Image (cartoon, rainbow, N blue to C red):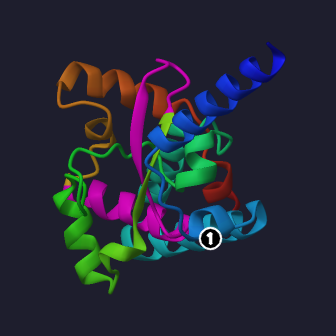
């Protein structure tokens, strides 16, 4: 009886692991210290390219979406919740293709990771970026293309965008402030 339960448990575990579509890249290899250095370098570059206020917005967005850089999605994917909308690169994000082309990145630099989302309990697949720097720079590139409407990250509904923006502005961009 115990062997039967153990076998069923192992089979169940294997089925769960096989159902996860996981392609790992450098995101899993970056230490928290390397990620923080990447983030600081990206924020510095965003300040130079787009201005301090833009860097603050990007940091606030990441802080909100990643629970201040503690979420599994951040640790594994280096992103602020970029869900996959298509199976192949650029995964439904045309701006990601444009960004990659302009910055010498290849489709193979990106991958996907499927996990159970904390708030909803739903299985979601996220884009995995090669490192935190690339993720931050992409979000700055995307927001710049949208006129720095950070609410557009959350919704296309103007009312929901305003609510989202209010949440962002309540967050202190500590890293940007330190630069």
Q: Dot 1, how many residues are within 10 Å of its Cα: few (below 14), some (14-19), or many (20+)?
A: some
Residue for badge 1: 38
Foreground residue, 86 or 179?
A: 86
In this rendering, the answer to whether 98 lies above or below 68 is: below
Magenta span includes 70: no
Foreground residue, 90 or 156?
A: 90
Left/right placement of residue 65 relative to residue 139 reads right
Foreground residue, 83 or 53?
A: 83
Image point (48%, 69%), residue name: 47
Q: Is residue 103 visible?
A: yes
* Residue interval drawn in magenta: 116-145
Q: Is residue 64 visible?
A: no
Left/right placement of residue 75 relative to residue 34 reads left
- Quadrant the C terminus occupies: bottom right
Instruction: Tell me residue 109's x, y (percent).
Output: 41, 74
Which structural element holds mark 1?
helix
In this rendering, the answer to whether 37 lies above or below 152 is: below
Instruction: Tell me residue 36's x, y (percent).
Output: 70, 63
Foreground residue, 48 or 65?
A: 65
- Quadrant the N terminus occupies: top right
Image point (64%, 67%), residue name: 40
Q: Residue furthest bottom?
A: 104
Q: Quadrant of residue 93?
A: bottom left
Instruction: Tell me residue 160's x, y (percent).
Output: 27, 21
Q: Residue furthest top?
A: 1
How many marks overall?
Answer: 1
Image point (63%, 39%), residue name: 71
In this rendering, the answer to whether 95 lies above or below 75 is: below
Image point (45%, 39%), residue name: 19
Magenta span includes 125: yes
Instruction: Tell me residue 52's x, y (percent).
Output: 48, 62
């Amino acid at each position: 009886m115990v062997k039967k339960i153990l076998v069923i448990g192992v089979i169940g575990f294997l089925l769960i692991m096989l159902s996860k579509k996981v392609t790992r890249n450098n995101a899993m290899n970056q230490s928290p210290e390397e990620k923080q250095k990447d983030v600081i370098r990206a924020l510095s570059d965003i300040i130079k390219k787009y201005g301090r206020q833009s860097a603050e917005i990007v940091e606030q967005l990441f802080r909100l979406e990643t629970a201040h850089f503690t979420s599994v999605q951040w640790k594994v994917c280096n992103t602020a919740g970029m869900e996959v909308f298509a199976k192949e690169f650029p995964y439904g994000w045309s701006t990601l293709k444009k960004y990659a082309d302009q910055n010498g990145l290849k489709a193979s630099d990106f991958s996907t990771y499927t996990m159970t989302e904390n708030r909803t309990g739903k299985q979601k697949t996220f884009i995995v970026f090669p490192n935190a720097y690339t993720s931050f720079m992409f979000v700055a590139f995307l927001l710049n293309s949208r006129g720095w409407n950070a609410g557009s990250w959350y919704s296309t509904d103007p009312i929901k965008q305003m609510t989202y923006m209010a949440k962002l502005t309540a967050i202190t961009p500590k890293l940007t402030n330190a630069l």
